[in-house]
Image: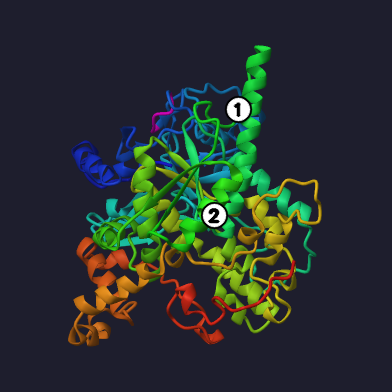
Amino acid sequence: MCGIFAVYNYQGDIEAYRQRALYLSKKIRHRGPDWSGCYTTKNHILCHERLAIVGVGSGAQPIVSDDEDIILSVNGEIYNHKQLRHDLKGDYVFKTESDCEVIMHLYKEHGTDLVNHLDGFFSFVLLDKKRNRIIAARDAIGISTLYYGWNSKMPESIYFASELKSLNEDCDKILAFPPGHVYDSDTKETTRWFNPTWWDENKIPANPVDYTQLRESLEKAVRKRLMAEVPYGVLLSGGLDSSLIAAIAARETEKIAAGIKASESEDEDFDESGPTSWPKLHSFSVGLPGSPDLIAAREVAKHLNTIHHEYTFTIQEALDAVSDVIYHLETYDVTTIRASTPMYLLTRKIKAMGVKMVLSGEGADEVFGGYLYFHNAPNTDDFHTETVNRVKNLHTSDCLRANKSTMAWGVEARVPFLDKSFLEIAMNIDPKEKMPDRSIGKMEKYIIRKAFDTSDDPTAKPYLPKEILWRQKEQFSDGVGYSWIDSLKETSEKKISDADFAQSASKWAKDAPTTKEAYMYRVMFDQWYPQEACTASVVRWIPRGDWGCPEDPSGRAQKVHDSAYEAKK
């Protein structure tokens, strides 16, 4: 990932604005510390802050086409870029080894429909100089962040940026660019391009689960995400989701290492997916001393034989970081801040080791109804509708957290559970197969657990230890240590007076805090982002109150947490 900033049709002297644009782009340089680029033409400007992962030596941006008609600034990874290059009808000159350059050539052949050909995560701005046209697009689920904004004093100008902090000083209207959409200056409209078969939440699927298909699809999703020319690793909480991704990545890394060794012995070239410098997978975990996640992650790492790195933090270190975390997240959502703080601290350690890319397990809870409050779903139809809505809104919560917590330190997080092909399979499974049932010991996320359960085949190598594969869901903010959330609540009780808290509704028209913890975060958010326009993109993550769930998003707050039942296997 990288950072992009662009202004189309700036109503003023663009060269005079150049220094201002460089300043606004610099505010997101943490996303791309490896190189900076800027291109101006007519009254348009595109800036780029690069994190080099693929095409390390030659992928500087903005990329300018050989005929200088197309200028491209991209944040993301295109996993099928080699196939796309091969399928191009025209004879184009590629100036870099970047996986993203193919986008500008696809534009020449497909126009805005090019986005339907991309397999990966991305946000980009493309300027067509001949047509004086700009298009901007964001990936299907919103793994990559993107915002756009307007200044009422220059109504014909439009701004784009990877993060809100590059827009809030110059724009009085800022929106999150919707995932799966493309903007076209020719029409001045933002239209949906991503239209999967499962998008209608009221259309209830009836497909039986195919465990082999489900497993192989996730394995393929992990495999393609090992595309990198730099050291990478896996975030390992010891929970089901990250452990499955780590288990698959460990197997794929072994294949890569074996292929390299074989090619060396035969004196042949080997087209490896990952770097040769780290032929063994590295895993990373974080928590308070003795936390559930650290203990479980240690067990998984031992089983997978990864090179494991375990980091602990103190309550005070985490509390000291909260304000900075809110600055990077650009939200005041309680659960996002709780979970992001340990992830933010861990990523700093990861970056210090020279790692630029990690695999992570976001998305599984939304796809399979893994949050403990899903146990309260009144029926399978409502269960399915909630999973679809949660996936649709991932860009406001878990994707935002995974992206900004890691990119705060220039580390890219890739999320295999949100692969488009995997979603097409998983989201079309009959919700009766997914829905947990305590009466028969059927755990949350039963089918994805079962897909990787090899207990019926004594000759098969287990993906994970049984106690990990069938471990109950722990939300990350709980798993790093229960005292973390408790300390946040205690701190807010000390900082926020009853008198101040009583004024919440009159102080904030939108999302008035209902707890002192939420009030504390909102004050910090306003200190960083005082402009009213900054709240439009914020969405709060809360369980379903109409299902009888408490408002507190912590998994521990749900009645089913630690309930004694034996999982059906």
**What residue span does the magenta drawing correspond to?**
58-62
Q: Residue furthest top?
A: 267
Describe the element under mark 1 as helix, strand or loop: loop
Rendered location of residue 545, percent (x, y): 50, 84
Which quadrant does the N terminus fall into?
top left
Query: Is 377 positioned to the left or the right of 286 in the image?
Result: right
Q: Residues within 10 Å of mark 2 (few under 14, many from 20)?
A: many
Name the disc covering residue 272, or none. Answer: 1
Query: Which residue is depicted at the point 47% across and 83% down?
Result: 550
Instruction: Count the labels in the image.
Output: 2
In terms of depth relative to the viewer, which is nearer, 261 or 48? 261
In this image, 540 relative to 509: left or right? right
Whether residue 398 is visible, yes or no, is: yes
The residue sitting at 21% across, 78% down in the picture is 494
Using the rendered image of the protein, determine whether residue 117 is visible from the camera's viewpoint: no
Magenta span: helix, strand or loop, mainly? loop
The percent coordinates of residue 558 (x first, y second) are: 51, 79
Q: Which numbered marker is on residue 361?
A: 2
Q: Mark 2 belongs to which amino acid?
A: Gly
**Colouring used for the render:** rainbow
Per the image, label 2 sits on a secondary structure element best described as loop
How far apart in space, not on screen, are marks 2 and 1 (Cα)? 23 Å
Amino acid type at mark 1: Glu
In the drawing, what numbered circle is on residue 91?
Answer: none
| Residue 154 position in % (x across, y down) | 26, 54
Front-lying residue, 537 or 405: 405
Rendered image quadrant of residue 504:
bottom left
Inspect the magenta stretch and tell me whether residue 459 lies in it.
Answer: no
